[in-house]
Amino acid sequence: MFIISNFLLAVSHVLDIALEVYKWIVIFSALISFVNPDPYNPVVKFLRSVTEPVYRLVRRYIPTVFYNVDFAPFIVILFIIFLQRFLVPTIQQLAYKLQ
């Protein structure tokens, strides 16, 4: 059982790191949208290609534009924080119980 436990611990750590990196990508994408960047810039293309599918999913179920401000990045960040505070510790506790 210790193999499954170690695997779950590794998965929880990798998931936590991936969520943290994606959170920062969403933050940079939101900040860069305020300056109206060049859409042909490779960095802007990357940020939009990584964040727009998630924003589109959020916008499908929740109206996110109020007073010409899009709150989709804020909702995505809140969801990421929820996953970091709930899902990652849950996987870690499950791993510790399997030891």
Image: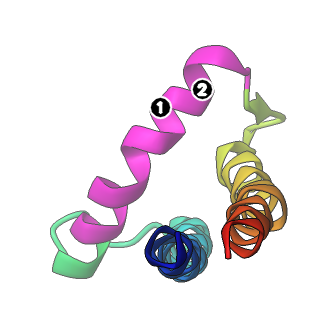
Provide the residue designation for mark 2: 59
Q: Which residue occupies 40% across, 46% down? A: 52
Q: CA distance from mark 1 to mark 2?
A: 5 Å
- Which residue occupies 75% across, 46% down? 75
Contact check, label 1 and label 2, Cβ < 8 Å: yes
Residue 73 or 13: which is nearer the viewer? 13
x%, y% of residue 84? 74, 67
Could you classify mark 2 by the number of other residues whose Cα lies within 10 Å: few (under 14), some (14-19), or many (20 or more)? some
Q: Which residue is mark 1?
A: 56
Query: Quarter of the image holding residue 30?
Result: bottom right
The overriding secondary structure of the stretch rendered in magenta is: helix
The local secondary structure at tag 1 comes to: helix
Q: Quadrant of the C terminus?
A: bottom right
Amino acid carrying mark 1 in the image: Arg
Which region shows up in magenta?
45-63
Q: Does residue 40 appear to the left or right of 2 in the view shown?
A: left
* Residue 49 forms part of the magenta stretch: yes
- Name the residue located 67 percent from the left edge and 50 percent from the top edge: 76
Q: Nearer the viewer, residue 54 or 83?
A: 83
Residue 79: x, y in percent? 74, 50
Instruction: Count every numbered label the image shows and give the total.
Output: 2
* Residue at disc 2, secondary structure: helix
Q: Is residue 69 magenta?
A: no
Is 71 drawn above or below residue 49 in the view shown? above
Tell me the quarter of the picture where residue 50 sits. bottom left
